Amino acid sequence: MFGYSMGDIGNIMIMQGFSGLSMFTVLLLMALGLAIIFGQMGVINMAHGEFMTIGAYTTVMLSKVAATYGFVNYYFLIAIVLAFILAFALGYFVEFIMIRHLYKRPLDTLLATWGLSLVMQQAFRSSFGAKEMSAELPEWMLGSFKPTPDIDIPINGVFVMVLALLVTAGVYIFMYRSRWGLRVRATVQNRVMAGAVGINTKKVDRVTFALGCGIAGVAGAAFTTIASTGPTTGTLYIVDSFMVVVFGGAASLMGTIASAFGIAQAQSILQFFMTSSMGKVTTLLVIVGILMMKPEGLFASKLRK
Amino acid sequence: MSTLNRRGFMKAGGALVGALLAAGLITTNAFAADFPTAKVNTTGLAVTDTTVKVGILHSATGTMAISETGSIQAEKLAIDQINAMGGILGRKIEVIQEDGASDWPTFAEKAKKLLASDKVAAVMGCWTSASRKAVLPVFEKENGLLFYPTFYEGLEQSKNVFYTGQEATQQVIAGLDWIAKEKKAKTFYLIGSDYIWPRTSMKIARKHIEKNLKGSVVGEEYIALGDTQFGSVINKIKLKKPDVIYAAVVGGSNVAWFKQLNAAGLNSTKQTMLTISVTEDEVLGIGGENLAGFYSAMKYFQSQDNPANKKFVAEFKKKWGAKSVIGDVTQAAYLGPWLYKAAVERAGSFDVDKVQAALPGYELKDAPEGPVTVEKNHHLTTKLRIGQWQKDGQAKVVYTSGYIKPDPFPKGYQ
């Protein structure tokens, strides 16, 4: 078939299947934090990418410390936790000084958070330098896992995949199985009523926003294994993140998962059979087409209008 | 010493001065008084009896700051060194630095400010082709002088610009010749970011591979700028099994490309790759372990072993920190002020027209990369070098070509 042996084609199909799944988990991890902030709170956070960058820089800096003190093999797990804490803390602070004043003016949040993203980029540039950096990866995370001599499964891809599944499960449990999640959902559905039954809606807002930022930090830490760390790294992710959340339907976790899966598979398969740019363009066209028919996204929340 | 009488001493001294004059070295000590301002500046540039204003126009903020910071540092170092030697025609260089902010209209606006209101005598600047194209009409209208450092796609020649980096044929052809011969490569997979420089370079590469090397191109792929997912592309490459991957991926994508390539098992023990978009600067982001064994085709590598380069590297690190690295473009930017100084001294004038006419034919002997000559088409004749990347982020130079004349409008390659 096309001059390739069946064995070759079989191997490529397996690796291609994995690369589709891997792209799915990358998109999912990118979008989860945003799904909470944009989906639950309706805040358009243009600085989402920069919160990822915080996670990425945390990892790079910790890797330097780890190299000095000789704990390179397991610093990455610490980096993920630290990335979450730092991004969470900054998110908490940003909500307090900026976002909470703008809840009634969604378009102004767009501008304000975009401004915030520029400020953060320049802050990264001033403190870490304009050049890109790389985290020193532990030995076990390099290279590929080989079930047969001709099949390579990237280990960093598996790592991102496992992490994405854990974070998704965590978000699900938090949102749908915990008292905090209950309060968040109550606040989203009816803020006044939630306040009336004794929920501190302002605190709920702050924690929700910070949580979204924290998850972005985790994503940024994970992406140091597959992509770059520089002051403008966040801009590489922001468009894809919004695309996944909007396409999935803003207020639904399932929607985000389904949309990340759909976009990743379409893009991965199209890029294999077409050229890379054309694959991306075609995916975007299909998304635009579907959004024209279903403006609320794949899984619109059922609201009485 | 006792045999050296006064006459002999004078003779020897005279010969020495003569030799220095011939080498053009002593002119740096010329007093400004020998070149009265009214004579050396007839067009109203910002040249006084003691100073000359020169502009630096790069992005210090925004996306491109990653790349352009090195150029700014190199230009400032060269200017400091020139001033320490007494300046140009006895005049100290005063730098006016403007920030293009990675935004092309801003570049044009700042170029206009530098030329029309600051009246700078020359500008060191721009990095991307887009920014150069944006300022070009301004330089032509105001009759300014631009020294442009980046290796680029060619297809341009302006009397107002000197191009201190390589144009595409200088970088592409000799590199492909080397890899075809050295690695007996017949099949090539071309991959680049989706904009003019990679596309023009790949066009030249394809023509050269098919016509002159009798090889074949088994895939040609362009990645959207900023794309970070390479899974499908890598699988395609695995299916096609090319002898050589020829790559020109830039920016954040570049880092993702190498990291994912390695993770997919395509490291240098299994795959030969020659890239034209990785310098020491990019290695910081990609990580030496992801690059080790792959090749870059550049005109300069920091590890080059010659006295001029050793001095340059030492002084660069002294000024900008021991950890700083120097890539191809940074070195090319370093040449700009030196070429300008030479041109003014050859012309005996700061007037732009005279400076333009005086520079072609000049050979800069002690450039860190080795001697370069300015050609009539305002590009440099240089050598191409192939570096093999090592884990520590430096390249080992494994091949140096002969001198390659610049050919910005290559016939048969367009």
Image: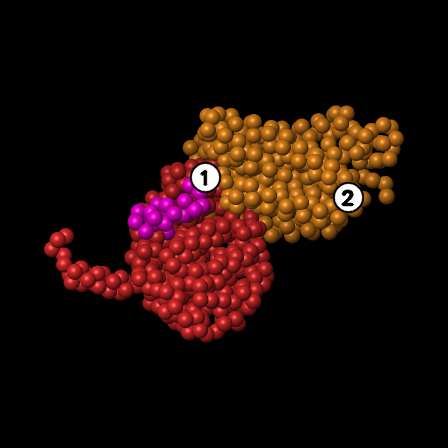
Chain colours: A orange, B red
Question: Mark 1: which amino acid?
Answer: Gly
Q: Is residue B364 left or right of residue B49?
A: left
How far across and how far down the image is residue B414, in percent?
A: 43, 65
- Please give the label number shown on residue A120: none
Foreground residue among B412 and A108 = A108
Q: Which quadrant is home to the C terminus of chain A?
A: top right
Can residue A283 be seen in the rendering of this structure?
A: yes
Q: Which residue is mark 2?
A: A102
Label 1 residue SS: loop
Q: Is residue B383 left or right of residue A62?
A: left
| Chain that bears disc 1 | B
From which residue to which does the magenta span run?
A: B300-323
Would you say the residues marked 1 and 2 are in contact, meaning their CB atoms lie under 8 Å apart? no
| Disc number lying in front (1 or 2) | 2
Image: B178 above or below A194: below
Q: Which residue is mark 1?
A: B287
Foreground residue among A245 and B212 = A245
Image: B185 above or below B117: above
Question: Mark 2: which amino acid?
Answer: Leu
How far across and how far down the image is residue B161, in percent?
A: 45, 66
Foreground residue among A75 and B107 = B107
Q: Residue at x 54, y 52 (%)?
A: B60
Q: Residue at x 37, y 57 (%)?
A: B85
Q: Residue at x 50, y 61 (%)?
A: B55
**Mark 1 surroundings within 10 Å by alpha-carbon count, few (fewer than 14), some (14 through 19), many (20 or more):** many
How far across and how far down the image is residue B53, in percent?
A: 48, 63
Q: Residue at x 74, y 46 (%)?
A: A109
Please say whether residue B316 is one of the residues in the magenta stretch: yes
